[in-house]
Image (cartoon, rainbow, N blue to C red):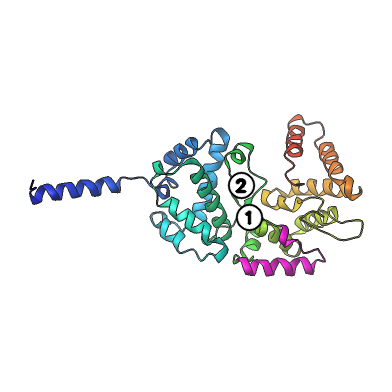
């Protein structure tokens, strides 16, 4: 059967039109309605849905500049990632190029983990962000989300974070030099790659932060001081990883209150400090039922002491 040239042209145009209308994951990340639909189908709902849309917004916007949305796949392709992160980049690219309806829930969630990781490590927009492993809600953790991402609103802290190396090898050297400078044990082998920049910020704030941050950092160091006068801020010899709180972007007043709690708990022997911390924290709540409930949740999740 022969077809006229006009019929063939019409068929080609229809095929091209059909292909152009296919919604890819890369498109959905910038369209909230489609993003929400995909997140809901992957098991996210309620407050976690709002939180996750915000995290995706922060992640993609930390990797682009205004007007670059349509070039997102090319931008990810061009990220100068270290060899150990190349697998995450390639896995993300595969999903970004895939039609939304062809990507399963597990693959989609893992691609979001990759996106958050790369956005935290290879931020190119100039907007300073930090990943947070202890900020993940129970629901998000249940479906496989391992970290969230948030803006650093304090301009001074953001400026300090901007000076911390992003290249993994340079960051590793930076961390080793800082722990040595402050007389701390080298615990870099116990840090997840997601936590490295937060740990670097914590150390840098001791030297470059204001008096509020400096006091907080000293309190965390003393909280982890052993009976042998050594300090491990991560790993099996650490009492707790309270340095992760730098992710929380707390106000000065809250940071001061927390510092007082940590200092009080540090008076106890190392093996009793975790209980002493929660006792002091509960006392600081001054009978406020909502605060006490939050403290109990924090204790149950064991966010800073695992």
Query: Can you say whether 125 is above or below 17 in the image?
Result: below
Q: Secondary structure at mark 2?
A: loop
- Report the front residue among 127 and 194: 194
Query: Can you say whether 226 is above or below 250 in the image?
Result: below
Residue 173 shown in magenta:
yes
Residue 146, labelled with which disc?
Answer: 2
Q: How many marks?
A: 2
Residue 192 shown in magenta:
no
- Tell me whether circle 1 and circle 2 mark residues in contact (CB < 8 Å): yes
- Report the front residue among 13 and 83: 83
Residue plotted at (66% across, 63% down):
160
Which segment did they paint magenta? Answer: 168-190
Residue 48 in view in this figure: yes
Q: Position of residue 251 (x, y in %)?
A: 70, 48
Residue 221 lies left or right of residue 156; in this view the side is right
Query: Can you say whether 29 is above or below 293 in the image?
Result: below
Residue plotted at (75% across, 65% down):
207
Q: Residue 297 sits in which quadrant? A: top right
Which residue in the structure is indicated by mark 1?
194
Label 2 environment density (alpha carbons within 10 Å; few <14, some 14–19, many ≥20)? many
**Which quadrant of the figure contains the N terminus?**
top left
């Amino acid at each position: 059967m022969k077809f006229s040239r006009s019929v063939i042209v019409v068929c080609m145009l229809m095929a091209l039109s059909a292909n152009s209308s296919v919604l890819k994951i890369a498109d959905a990340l910038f369209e909230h309605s489609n993003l929400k639909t995909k997140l809901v189908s992957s098991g996210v709902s309620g407050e976690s849905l709002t939180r996750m849309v915000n995290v995706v917004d922060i992640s993609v916007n930390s990797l682009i500049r205004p007007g670059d949305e349509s070039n997102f796949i090319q931008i990810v392709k061009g990220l100068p990632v270290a060899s150990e992160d190349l697998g995450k980049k390639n896995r993300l690219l595969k999903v970004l190029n895939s039609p939304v309806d062809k990507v399963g829930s597990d693959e989609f969630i893992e691609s979001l983990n990759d996106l958050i990781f790369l956005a935290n490590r290879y931020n190119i927009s100039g907007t300073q962000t930090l990943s947070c492993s202890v900020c993940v809600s129970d629901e998000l953790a249940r479906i496989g989300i391992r970290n969230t991402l948030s803006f650093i609103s304090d301009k001074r802290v953001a400026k300090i974070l901007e000076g911390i190396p992003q290249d993994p090898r340079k960051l590793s050297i930076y961390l080793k030099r800082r722990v040595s400078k402050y007389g701390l044990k080298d615990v870099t082998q116990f840090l997840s790659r997601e936590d490295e920049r937060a740990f670097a910020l914590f150390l840098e704030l001791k030297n470059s932060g204001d008096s509020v941050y400096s006091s907080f950092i000293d309190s965390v160091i003393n909280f982890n001081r052993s009976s042998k006068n050594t300090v491990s801020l991560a790993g099996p010899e650490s009492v707790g990883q309270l340095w992760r709180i730098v992710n929380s972007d707390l106000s000065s007043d809250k940071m001061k209150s927390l510092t007082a709690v940590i200092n009080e708990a540090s008076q106890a022997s190392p093996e009793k400090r975790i209980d002493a911390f929660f006792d002091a924290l509960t006392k600081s709540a001054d009978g406020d039922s909502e605060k006490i409930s939050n403290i109990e949740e924090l204790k149950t999740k064991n966010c800073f002491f695992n």
